[in-house]
Image (cartoon, helix red, strand yellow):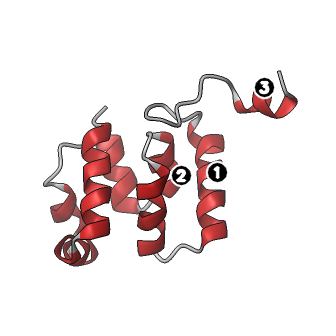
């Protein structure tokens, strides 16, 4: 997995108005500059915040991506929860999950 490249894209998008404009006009061309897996590419191109979270993106970077997409805070939080429900536990990065969500909720 190329988590570094995924987060590099998010960082660049958060900081560089040229990257923002390019993503808005042609997300595929913008993303082609990064060495992403097919799944990372698809998640970013589709604005699938839940999947980007599950892939391991840092929340500080991801919240700016969600805001860039016009996603309100509550919807961003819900997208992360829905991502776990749909795609499984966070796979990489500092939020990697080592237990199942139902175990965490049950206090196991």
Tell me the element at label 2: helix
Query: Is 52 left, or right, of 42 in this rendering?
Result: right
User: Who's the residue at 66% across and 59% down the image?
Assistant: 78
Q: Residues within 10 Å of mark 2 (few under 14, many from 20)?
A: many
**Residue at the disc numbered 3:** 103
In three-dimensional space, the C-alpha distance between marks 1 and 3, rounded to whole angstroms, equals: 17 Å
Query: Is 44 left, or right, of 34 in this rendering?
Result: right
Q: Nearer the viewer, residue 75 or 14?
A: 14
User: Who's the residue at 67% across and 68% down the image?
Assistant: 74
Q: Is residue 37 visible?
A: no
User: Who's the residue at 52% across and 31% down the image?
Assistant: 96
Measuring from the top left, give residue 106's x and y in whole percent: 86, 29
**Residue at the disc numbered 2:** 50
Measuring from the top left, give residue 66's x and y in whole percent: 47, 66
Q: Nearer the viewer, residue 37 or 15?
A: 15
**Picture layout, residue 108 above or below residue 66:** above
What is the quadrant of residue 55 in the picture? Answer: top left
Query: Is 15 left, or right, of 55 in this rendering?
Result: left
Specify the quadrant that holds the C terminus: top right
Q: Residues within 10 Å of mark 3 (few under 14, many from 20)?
A: few
**Residue at the disc numbered 1:** 82
């Amino acid at each position: 997995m190329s988590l570094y490249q995924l987060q590099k894209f998010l960082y660049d998008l958060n900081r560089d108005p040229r990257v923002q404009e390019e993503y808005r006009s042609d997300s595929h061309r913008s993303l082609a500059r990064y060495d992403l897996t097919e799944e990372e590419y698809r998640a970013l191109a589709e604005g699938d915040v839940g999947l980007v979270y599950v892939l391991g993106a840092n929340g500080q970077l991801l919240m700016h991506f969600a805001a860039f997409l016009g996603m309100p805070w509550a919807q961003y939080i819900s997208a992360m929860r829905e991502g776990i429900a749909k795609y499984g536990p966070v796979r990489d990065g500092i939020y990697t999950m080592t237990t199942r969500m139902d175990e965490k909720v049950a206090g196991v």
